[in-house]
Amino acid sequence: ATVGGGASNTASGNYATVGGGNFNDARAYASTVGGGDSNSVLNVYGTVGGGWSNTIFGSSGTIAGGAPTDFATAITISNTRNIVFDDYGSIGGGGNNRVGSDDANRTNAGFATIGGGRDNIASGNRSTIGGGTDNAADGFATTIGGGRSNTVLAQYGTIAGGGPANATNSTTISNTRNIVYDNYGTIGGGGNNRVGADDGSVSGQVYATVSGGRGNVAASSYTTIGGGENNIASGVYATVGGGDDNIADDVYTTIGGGQTNTAGSVYATVGGGNANSAVGVASTIGGGVLNDATGDQATIGGGIGNEANGLSSIVGGGDSNNATGQYSTISGGSGNSVLNDNATVGGGSRNNANGQFSTIPGGLAAQTNLYGQWAYASGSFATAGDAQSGLYVLRNVVPADTDEVELFLDGTSQRLVIPNNRVIAFNIQVVAVDADDNAAAWQVSGMIKNIGGTTTILGFAPINLIAQDADFTGNFLINVDDDFDALIITGDGSNSPTRFVAVVRTAEVGL
């Protein structure tokens, strides 16, 4: 054993060395104290470079230097010194740092490291704290780069830095620090961020990440929050890029940013904006304000107060539009609605597409009620649809030499019904072709009205034959069915099965 100099130093272990200083104690085999004051190496192969009151209990431990953080009394010095409790532990410097666990078992938390700082505890086996203050690395192979009051409770967890969001007192510090609860969790920085779940298990919600920000919670496995404030990613593989008060709470949900947005069903996405809610499966909202995509695969591009409630419905943008029908579309505009399946409103304002496969290109206050109807208006007298133009296409296949087979909007059953208290001027073009390629075309105009449920047709001109092949023997007729309040178009078949198509163009006025 060797004591190089100083005063009151002790080197009592075989091959122990004290280089100098005062009241240093190297009492274990091959232990070393370079200098300083009141340093102790109590297990084999330990080394203290210098400083004051540094103590090593574990074998092969290292403390480069540092000192207590409170020199007032012998008790405070003892309570705030640097200590390596377990084997192969290391402290670079600082004060009141602890490596390992004070449980007399020197192998439980071996190979732990603290680079410096103060009041840090690396109690997990192979855990590391770079510096900072009041940090705790409790899990196996956990890492804390620095900052203040950061805590990693699970294996392989990481906190790069950051600290409490409210450092007013010990309670607020504890309540607003960064914490990694589950294995492989990561916090880049910020304050009051949580990764994993505080449920007593460290393996239930793994690989979650919060890059930074404040008050963010990545609560399920593989969830990610880029930053911002008070965001929650609680569905497995959910992502919140940033913003504040956003919630991605189902599997594979994504919120890019913005404020108080919700992605609440599998594969749902909100790009940004404010108070948007995508709760249908695979629904998407690009941005805007107060938009709701409740239908599965529904999409809203942006705007304000829009709703896409039908399956695969789309609202491009605008204000207060409602796409309720399945596969319905509203490109934009204001106050438009699509209530039936596969219907479309191109834009404009206060247009209502209520008929299946119907279309309103734009304009103001048009309304469709029938299958495949097209309507356009530039305003109304009192209600939508009471001053508009319309287009209807009817069809059917008429058997050979069969008379008065009705044409329908959908080819099978949907009639051209006249709304109550509506007067319509019409122009009808009809074309027909039989299986032998013989064809004919006709045209007729007239007026039909439904007043109080009584539907009549009047004033129509004679049917005009536009053209006809010599061998075509079919014909067509128009009439009204008061029971159904419908304009009836029928076809007489030629010598072979005959396809009829009628196009009805209208000017419509309501009472």
Image: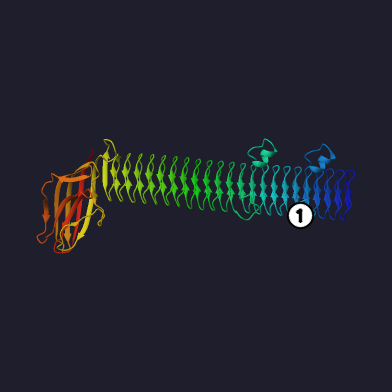
According to the picture, the residue beneath numbered tag 1 turns out to be 88
Residue at the image position 18 percent from the left and 53 percent from the top:
489
| Residue 383 locus on image (x, y percent) | 29, 38
Quadrant of the rendered image containing residue 495: bottom left
Indicate the secondary structure of the residue bearing disc 1: loop
Residue at the image position 47 percent from the left and 45 percent from the top:
277
| Residue 293 locus on image (x, y percent) | 43, 47
| Residue 134 locus on image (x, y percent) | 71, 43
Quadrant of the rendered image containing residue 402: bottom left
Quadrant of the rendered image containing residue 119: top right
Q: Amino acid at mark 1?
A: Tyr
Quadrant in the picture for the C terminus: top left
Query: Could you say which is closer to the camera, residue 189 or residue 255?
Result: 255
Query: Could you say which is closer to the camera, residue 214 or residue 71?
Result: 214
Q: Height in image: 165 above or below 184?
A: above
Left or right: 298 as drawn, with respect to 93: left
Query: Could you say which is closer to the camera, residue 6 or residue 210?
Result: 210
